[in-house]
Amino acid sequence: MNKGKILIVDDKKSVLSALELLLQSEYKTITTLANPNGITSISDLNTYNVIMLDMNFSAGVNTGNEGFYWLKRINELTQNTSIIMMTAYGGVELAVRALKEGATDFILKPWDNHKLLSTIQSAYQLQQSRKEVSHLKEKTKHLKQLINKNETPIIGNSKAINQVLKITQKVAKTKANILITGENGTGKELIAQAIHNGSLRKDEVLVTVDMGAITESLFESELFGHTKGAFTDAHEDRAGKFETANGGTLFLDEIGNLSLTLQAKLLAVLENREIFRVGSNDPIPVDIRLICATNCNLEQMVDEDLFREDLLYRINTIQIEVPPLRLRDDDILLLAEYFLTSYSSKYGKSGLKLNASSKKKLLNHQWPGNVRELQHTIERSVILSEHNILTSNDFVFKKQAFSATQEMNITLDDMEKTMIENALVKHEQNFSAAANQLGITRQTLYNKIKRYGI
Ligand SMILES: Nc1ncnc2c1ncn2[C@@H]1O[C@H](COP(=O)(O)OP(=O)(O)OP(=O)(O)O)[C@@H](O)[C@H]1O
C-alpha cells in the first residue's frame, strides 16, 4: 500500500464513500469532507499528497466557480500538493481553465475506476517530484551560501591595490567579461571572488577551473559534462563546470596554459552560449559571467600565434592588472600583520609581534612569489618561532637564491623590459613619472616601449 494521504472534497456523500472505498486499499490515509468550508480548518493540509476537489457545491449551481475559489485557496495554503478537479458538467474549456489556474488534472464524473486510479497515481508522483525539487533547491541555496561565505578579505592600502579595488567595484555589477592579469600569487583569484561577490549573481555559485591542471583528454568532459556510456569510465550522466556555473560566474584560471585546440573549443562555447555534453547532441544553453586570469602576456602570445586573438577579444572586455607585491610597499606590513594574526590564532601562539628589524627585512625583500610567498613566510615563522617577538632571523628567503640563479638565464633586454613594465605599473602608466624614475627621457621611454612591444 502507498503511504500517500488523499483528501476528497465533495458535497455528495455517495461520491465520498465510493472514492473512499476505491482508494483505501491503495493509499494509507483517506480523508473525506462534504463541506469545502472545512478545508481551512485542516491544520495539516500541506501534508496531503493529493486533493480531489469537486467544482460545484451549491445546489443548482454548475459554473465551477466555487471549485475555482477553493482551488486558489488550497494553492495558497499548500506548497506542492496535487489538486485534481472533479465535475459532472465539464467541457474542454473548463478543464483548460482548471489546469491554467493550478490544478494538476481534471476528472469527469462518472469516472472509470481504472483511469481514475492512474490519474491519482500520476498526481501523487508529481507531488513527490515537486517536493524533492523543493528540497534540492533549499539544499542548493544553503550550499551556495556556505560556498560564498568563505570570503577572504583583500588586505592592502597601497595606491596600486586601491586602484585595482576601485575598478573591481566598478565592473562587478556589469555583465562584462573580465581578464585579470598579474604575476603568480598577486591575488588574482581573490579579485575574481570580489567581482563575483559584488555582482548581481552573488547568490549563485562561483565555479573555478584551473585550466593549467586539465589534460587535453579530460577537457571536454570536465567543462561540458558527459552522458552515461559516452566513454569507458562514464558510469553516469554528469554535469560539467559550465552547467554547474549556470546562472553564476565561471572563473577560468591560468587561461594562458590552454592549447590552441582547446582554445578553439572554448571559443565555440563562449560564442554560442551553449554546450553539448560529451556523448549527446542536445544543446544545453548556459548563462555564465566569465572571469579569466593569467600570468602570461596574452597579447604577446597572440603575436607569437600561441593564443587566439578572437578568444582574447571575447575574454578581455575589461582587463585588470594586479601589480606585484614589490610595487606595493604600503601593503607588505599590513599583509604581514594580517597573516601573523591569523596564523598565531591557527597555531595557538597568540601575542606574536614583529620587531623593527624583521619589518625592515620584509620591506626590503623583492617577493618574487608575491602575497603567497609572504603568507607562507609568515606561516613558517609562526610555526618555528620560540619567542613572542619575531626578529629578522626568523625570516629566511629561499626564493632570493632561486631568483638570483634565474636571473643568470635572462638577458639585459629582458631585465630592462621588466624594469620599464614595473615603472609603468608603479606610476599608473604616467610616462613622465616612469621615465623620471628610470633616469631616461620621455622620448627614450617611448622608443623602448615600442621596441619591447610593451
Ligand atoms: N590582498 C590580499 N589580502 C589577503 N590575502 C591575499 C591578498 N592577495 C593574495 N592573498 C592570498 O595570497 C594567496 C595567493 O592569492 P591568489 O591565489 O588569489 O593569487 P593568484 O594571483 O590567483 O595566484 P596564481 O596566479 O598562482 O593562481 C591566497 O592565499 C590569497 O588568499
Image: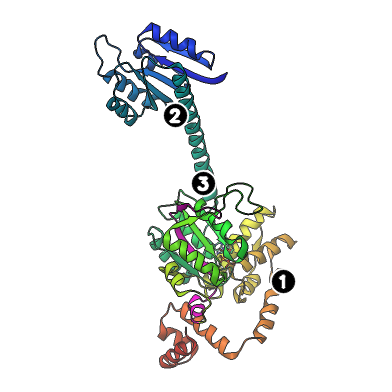
Which residue corresponds to mark 2? Answer: 80
First in residue order: circle 2 vs circle 1: 2
* Image location (x, y in percent) of residue 233: 66, 52
Closest to the observer: 353 or 406? 406
Front label number (3 vs 1): 3
Asked whether the residues under the numbered discs 3 and 2 touch, taking CB atoms below 8 Å apart as contact, a structural biologist would say no
Disc 3 on helix, strand or loop? helix
Specify the amino acid type for callout 1. Asn
Magenta-colored span: 278-303
Specify the amino acid type for callout 3. Lys
* Mark 2 C-beta closer than 8 Å to ligand 1: no
Specify the amino acid type for callout 2. Asn
Q: Can residue 140 be seen?
A: yes
Label 1 crowd bin: few (<14), some (14–19), many (20+), radius 10 Å: few
Asked whether the residues under the numbered discs 2 and 1 touch, taking CB atoms below 8 Å apart as contact, a structural biologist would say no
Q: Is residue 357 left or right of residue 317?
A: right
Disc 1 on helix, strand or loop? helix
First in residue order: circle 3 vs circle 2: 2
First in residue order: circle 3 vs circle 1: 3
Task: State the quadrant of the N terminus.
Answer: top right
Ligand 1, by image quadrant, is bottom right
Closest to the observer: 390 or 27? 27
Q: CA distance from mark 3 to mark 1?
A: 44 Å
Q: Which mark is residue 144?
A: 3
* Image location (x, y in percent) of residue 307: 51, 75
Q: Which mark is residue 393?
A: 1
In the rendered image, the vertical position of residue 369 relative to residue 205, given as above or below: below
Q: Which mark is residue 101?
A: none
Q: Can residue 42 be seen?
A: no
Residue name at image x 52 percent, y 81 percent: 304
